Structure formats: structure tokens, C-alpha cells
Amino acid sequence: MATRIFIDGAAGTTGLEIRDRLAGRNEFELLVLDDAQRKDMTARREALRESDIAILCLPDDAAREAVSLAKGSDTRIIDASSAHRVADGWTYGFPEIVGREKVAEAQYVSNPGCYPTGFLALVAPLVRVGLLPEDWPFTCNAVSGYSGGGKALIERYEAAPDLAFRTYGLNLDHKHRPEMQRHAGLVHGVLFAPAVVPAYRGMLVEVPLHLGAIDDHLTAEQLRAALQEFFAGSEIVAVNNGDAFTELILKDGAPPSDTMELFVFGNEGGWNARLIARLDNLGKGASGAAIQNLNIMCGLPETAGLRL
């Protein structure tokens, strides 16, 4: 029997990408509301409660409302908003970090943010094995394609071809910081510097480290080896040796991808390192991660329907 799926917010960027990845998969039956019903509270409530799994592609307040509408039912929920990423009773949907078993058994799964996906892939495993201290003042610099800002930012970039670079979060209180700190197990909040570039999709997330200030004997090679061991066997996350690279590029018009590449670069002498994640902000950073979690929750092959 097919699993009934309802995407609340299916007309948005993330929802449309999720529907694309579900196209042609007979394991699932999509419950679809027409344009007149999408904002009708009664219709949404019925769809949420009739589905086996609901995927929320909504602003935070609307996501909280959807959870309330489904309360008391057996519906399992994957929330792609940031509303529940540090909430009690929710499983953080980064199976490589939290464990696939937890995702498989959860009723409520909160999909990670795009920037935190890169940051946590780089930092959480290294903190966990003790190579990086949990009380280090971590900095994260990142650039993303403009699709990550939703409809308003997409329209802004497409209406202004001279818009080359946008840095934001200048109040130093970006909404992704709590999940970055919590799920990496850090004592201090992350100094986070996000930016947007004129490419539709794609993302580079960087964590620079002064290794000599952390530990005189710590090397980039050790960090790379630990990440390679942690993600060994993954079909989604790859740790690149990095030796042949002199630059990393985001290409406008790049095809969708649900993979993520990790790089560790070190200087001669080993005193400094740059940890970099390259991913699709709409792939592993959003819709691809939702499908990965959906597969795990349904006991299906983890990579089914993904663009690898």
C-alpha cells in the first residue's frame, strides 16, 4: 500500500523541488489541494490528518500552525522550516550526524537549514572525536545562490541583473545560529557571516581555523582523515582529498544535486586550515534532505529519488 504524502506549501520553491523528486515513485500517493484549498484551514487540516507523512514547506509560523492542526493524529511530520530545529520532541533530520535509527523511528523530524548542513558536516564530527574543542569560538563564512531566500529574493535578483553580492545577517543574530551551536555540541554561538551571489542554486560554507592556536600538533591532514572516516561509505557526502584544487566555484545554471562535498585545505607548516562544504542549497540543503529523511522514515533505500 502506498504511503500517503501531503506537502503543505507545495507551491513554494522547496515544495516544488520535493514534488519533482517524488515524481514517478509508486511507493507514495500524493494528497494534493487545488489553489482554492491551499489556504483553506479546514482542507489543510483534513489533508494533514489523513496523510501518513506531511512535509511542511512553510514559513515558521505557518509550520507551527500546521503541527497544531495535525495534533492528536498519527501523522508523521517532516518540517522544512526553521520552526522546530532546536525544539524539544523533534528529531533533527541530519541522519549522518544524529543517526539513521533516530530518524527512522521519529514522528517529528525537523529538516536542517542549508547553511547549517555544511557547517555541521564539517564541525560536528571533529568535535565529537575531540579534534576540535567544543568551547572554540567558531567562525563560519558562507555564500548561497539566491533561491535560498525564497520568492521575494528570487524576484529581487531576477529583476536586478546588476545585483552582484549581498551580505546580510549584520545584526549577528541569524536564525540558523542556534541549530549550528546545538547540533555541533558547542559552548559558544557561531560567528556567522552569510552572503548571497547571483547564481540560482549552490552554496559554499567555510570554517577557517587557526590550528596552531587550537593545538600545536593538530594538522589539516588529521582533520581530513577524521572526516573521511566519519563519512566513509556515504553515497551522499564525499570528503575530497583537496590536493588538486586551487579554487572552488559555484556555477550559475548548475543542475540540481543532492550530494555534498567536503574539503580540508591546510597551509605549509600546518598552522592554518580552511574547511569548506560545497552543496546545493535546494538539494542536500533542503528538498534532497527531506526526501532522504522520508526514505529513511519509510524503510526505503536512503538514496531513492535523489539526484546523485
Image (cartoon, helix red, strand yellow):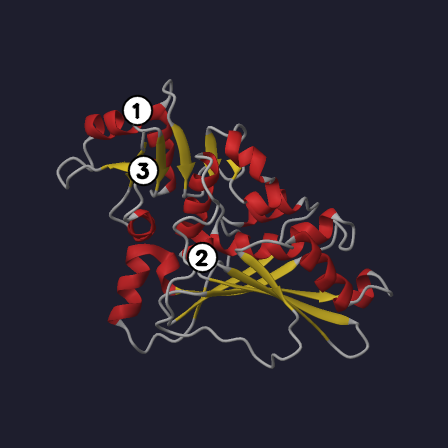
Asked if one can make out residue 307 in the rendered structure from this viewpoint, the answer is yes
Q: Amino acid at mark 3?
A: Phe
Which mark sits nearer the N-terminus, 2 or 3?
3
Helix, strand or loop status at disc 1: helix
Tell me which label, 1 or 3, sits earlier in the chain. 3
Mark sitting on residue 49: 1
Q: Position of residue 19 (x, y in %)?
A: 29, 48
Specify the label residue 258 is tagged with: 2
Q: Earlier in the sequence, mark 2 or mark 1?
A: 1
Q: Is residue 260 left or right of residue 11?
A: right
**Disc 3 marks which residue?**
28
From the top left corner, tell me how far across and down residue 64 is, in percent.
Answer: 38, 32
What's the amino acid at mark 2?
Asp
Look at the picture and state if 114 lies above or below 50: below
Q: Which residue appears farthest toward the top when viewing the image?
A: 72
**SS for callout 3:** strand
